[in-house]
Amino acid sequence: MGRFSNLRKNKKYNYEPRYYDNEGEDRPFKMDGRFTKYSKLYNNSDHSLKGKVNRAMNDLNNQDPMVNRRIMIIVAILLFIFLYIIDFDLSIFSD
């Protein structure tokens, strides 16, 4: 049993550049997503599942009404492009 207590410890490699400010805003080694600083879910301190769901529902209910209109316009344009590509005849809806 005494044989295992004398094992060699692994060395740690702790590289820190000489002129690098680790506390700065534009840290090159920071591994965050591109849009995390804009996310309300990421910047809030409540990390429970219920808190996240409540914030997501509040964001869904309090969003800009122009966003819904813009999404509907984009969907309609894509739908008409798809119908044009498959040569759908719109005359079947008229008498």
Image (spheres, rainbow, N blue to C red):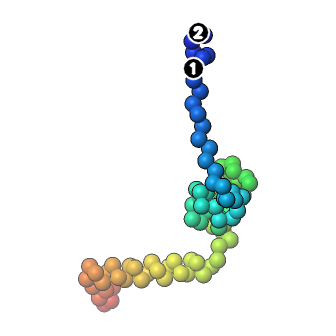
Looking at the figure, which quarter contains the N terminus?
top right
Instruction: Give the alpha-carbon distance from disc 1 to disc 2, as whole Å.
Output: 11 Å
Q: Earlier in the sequence, mark 1 or mark 2?
A: 2
Q: Nearer the viewer, mark 1 or mark 2?
A: 1
- From the top left corner, tell me how far across and down residue 21 is, in percent: 69, 59
Q: Quadrant of residue 5?
A: top right
Specify the farthest residue to the left: 87
Q: Which mark is residue 1?
A: 2
- Closest to the observer: 88 or 57? 57
Residue at left 68%, top 71%?
A: 62
Q: Residue furthest front?
A: 18
Amino acid at dot 1: Leu
Depth check, front residue: 22 or 42: 22
Q: Residues within 10 Å of mark 1 (few under 14, many from 20)?
A: few
**Left or right of 63 in this view: 69:** left
Find disc 1 in the rendering and name its residue: 7
Q: Three-letter amino acid code at disc 2?
A: Met
